[in-house]
Image: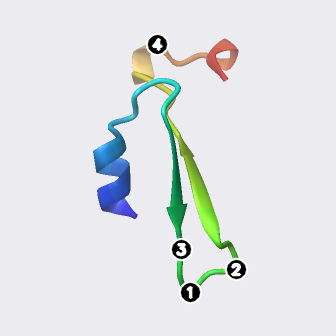
Amino acid sequence: MKQSINDMGGVFGKLSIIPTTGTSAQRILLAGLGKKENFTNDTI
């Protein structure tokens, strides 16, 4: 999981679906929200 997050880089608008094992969720969706200083409620 950590490697997937690092590969994604937090680029605004980028989506990644990560398969999981050992959890009730089959997949996790990671959504890039951009740089922290540019993040607002409106960017969601």
Q: Label 4 to label 3, Cα distance in Å?
A: 30 Å
Residue at the disc numbered 3: 20
Residue at the disc numbered 4: 38
Determine the residue positioned at 46% across, 13% down. 38
Give the mark, 4 or 2, whose residue is nearer the N terminus. 2
Label 4 crowding class (10 Å Cα cut-off): few <14, some 14-19, many 20+?
few
Image quadrant for the N terminus?
bottom left
Residue at the disc numbered 2: 24
Q: Amino acid at mark 1?
A: Gly
* Up-down relation of residue 16 to residue 36 (above or below): below
User: Circle 3 — which element?
Assistant: loop
Residue mark closest to the camera, 4 vs 3: 3
Q: Amino acid at mark 3?
A: Thr
Give the mark, 4 or 3, whose residue is nearer the N terminus. 3
Q: Label 4 to label 2, Cα distance in Å?
A: 33 Å
Q: Nearer the viewer, residue 5 or 42?
A: 5
Assess whether mark 3 and mark 1 are in contact (beta carbons under 8 angstroms): yes
- In the image, residue 15 lies at what x, y percent? 53, 39
Is residue 25 rendered to the left or right of residue 22? right
